[in-house]
Amino acid sequence: MIFDTDIFIWMQRGNYRAAKLVETADERYLSIFSYMELLQNAKNKKQHKFTNDFLKSYCFQVLPFTENIGHRSAVYVEEYSLTYGLRATDAVIAATAVENALTLCTSNKKHFHFIKELDLKIFKP
């Protein structure tokens, strides 16, 4: 399963259900864009280290940005940005899930529900 950035935010806020969800996943992935968002929100090097240690302790694999993901992301932005307000980062996260045949776990259903080939697991905090 690939996790959207919001799941990590729920965990940081102490949401037990989000932590349980991550703990019980057989495999844990995140997009390089989610990884960068997590680092970008850190206030200092100590928080960078904490993020990296957390991801390592749960055996998260960061999935790279590939040419196919880039192409699919661009198609999604062209197709859905005007009608649904799809943002580039969410397009990349969705494309990463689709290109790797993974279920995307998110609490932001409104950001992704319109992408037909995307397998979604909606987390309700």
Image: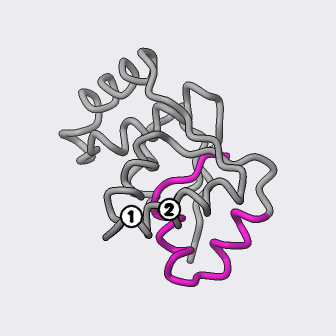
Q: Is residue 65 left or right of residue 60?
A: left
Residue 83 to residue 99: above or below: below
Disc assigned to residue 45: 1
Q: Is residue 58 left or right of residue 111?
A: right
- Mark 1 and mark 2 in contact? Answer it, CB < 8 Å: yes
Badge 1 amino acid: Lys
Question: Could you say which quadrant of the image residue 103 lies in?
Answer: top right
Give the residue displayed 40% in from the left and 22% down from the top.
72
Asked which secondary structure carries label 2, the reply is: helix
Neighbour tally class for label 1: few under 14, some 14-19, many 20 plus, Cα within 10 Å:
few
Q: Is residue 58 left or right of residue 75?
A: right
Q: How far, Cα to Cα, is label 1 from label 2?
A: 6 Å
Residue 75, percent across and down? 32, 23
Asked which secondary structure carries label 1, the reply is: helix
Task: Decide whether residue 78 is among the magenta residues.
Answer: no
Magenta residues span: 1-23
Give the residue displayed 67% in from the left and 77% down from the top.
17
What residue is shown with label 2? Answer: 49
Residue 113, percent across and down? 46, 48
Residue 124 to residue 71: above or below: below
Residue 104 to residue 66: above or below: below
Magenta stretch: helix, strand or loop mostly:
helix
Q: Is residue 61 left or right of residue 111?
A: right
Q: Residue furthest left?
A: 82
Q: From the image, which quarter does the C terminus lie in?
A: bottom right
Neighbour tally class for label 2: few under 14, some 14-19, many 20 plus, Cα within 10 Å:
few
Disc assigned to residue 66: none
Give the residue displayed 71% in from the left and 66% down from the top.
21
**Residue 1 versus residue 39: which sits nearer the camera?**
39
Badge 2 amino acid: Lys
**Residue 45 versus residue 71: which sits nearer the camera?**
45
Question: Could you say which quadrant of the image residue 11 lies in?
Answer: bottom right
